Amino acid sequence: MVSGLYFIDSWAWIEYLKPRTAGEQVRRIIDGSDSLVTSTTVLAEVYYKILSEVSESDAEKAVEFMKRKAVIASLDEETAKAAARIKKNEKLSLADSFVLAAARKFNAVVLTGDPDFKRIPDVHYLGV
């Protein structure tokens, strides 16, 4: 069992759903934890990726899976403002800034392999 609250980034969901290099590490963490959160922004990214590369049916299945595994957090005005500050200060994309802002709101560690997060504290980075 993995301890602590993890905020699951779209990179990690994609690795889990379409296992590639880091898929096994991601699976161990997601399957071994009962404290997972993700956001509507991440849900949109995953849905788009699977919709574009596979099918709408598979994208729907992915969303249902994500909803079973994690709490899906809606983003509010406070988180949006925090994301804007992160984008300005950390020079992340807006989507990544929302991920980091939401994770911080929940005092969670971001699970990702996205290289843009490599230098950010409170990130469990699985990339190379």
Image (spheres, helix red, strand yellow):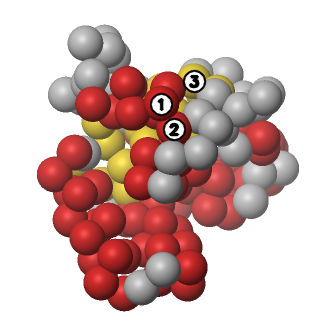
Name the residue located 46 percent from the left edge and 60 percent from the top edge: 42
Amino acid type indicated by mark 3: His
Q: Is 50 rendered above or below residue 73? A: below
Report if the CB atoms under discs 1 and 2 are less than 8 Å apart.
yes
Mark 1 and mark 2: span between their CA atoms?
4 Å
Could you tell which of marks 3 and 2 lies nearer the N-terminus?
2
Task: Identify the mark at residue 24; answer none if there is no mark.
Answer: 1
Of residues 75 and 77, which is closer to you in this image? 75
Mark 3 burial class by Cα count in 10 Å: few <14, some 14-19, many 20+: some
Residue 126: tell me if it is visible.
Answer: yes
Relative image position of residue 116 (x, y in whole percent): 78, 44
Q: Point out the image quarter for the C terminus.
A: top right
Task: Identify the mark at residue 11; answer none if there is no mark.
Answer: none
Mark 2 burial class by Cα count in 10 Å: few <14, some 14-19, many 20+: some
Name the residue located 16 percent from the left edge and 51 percent from the top edge: 68
Of residues 69 and 76, which is closer to you in this image? 69
Amino acid type indicated by mark 2: Gly
Task: Identify the mark at residue 124; answer none if there is no mark.
Answer: 3
Q: In which quarter of the image is residue 29?
A: top left
Relative image position of residue 125 (x, y in whole percent): 64, 27
Of residues 112 and 23, which is closer to you in this image? 23
Mark 3 and mark 2: span between their CA atoms?
14 Å
Amino acid type indicated by mark 1: Glu
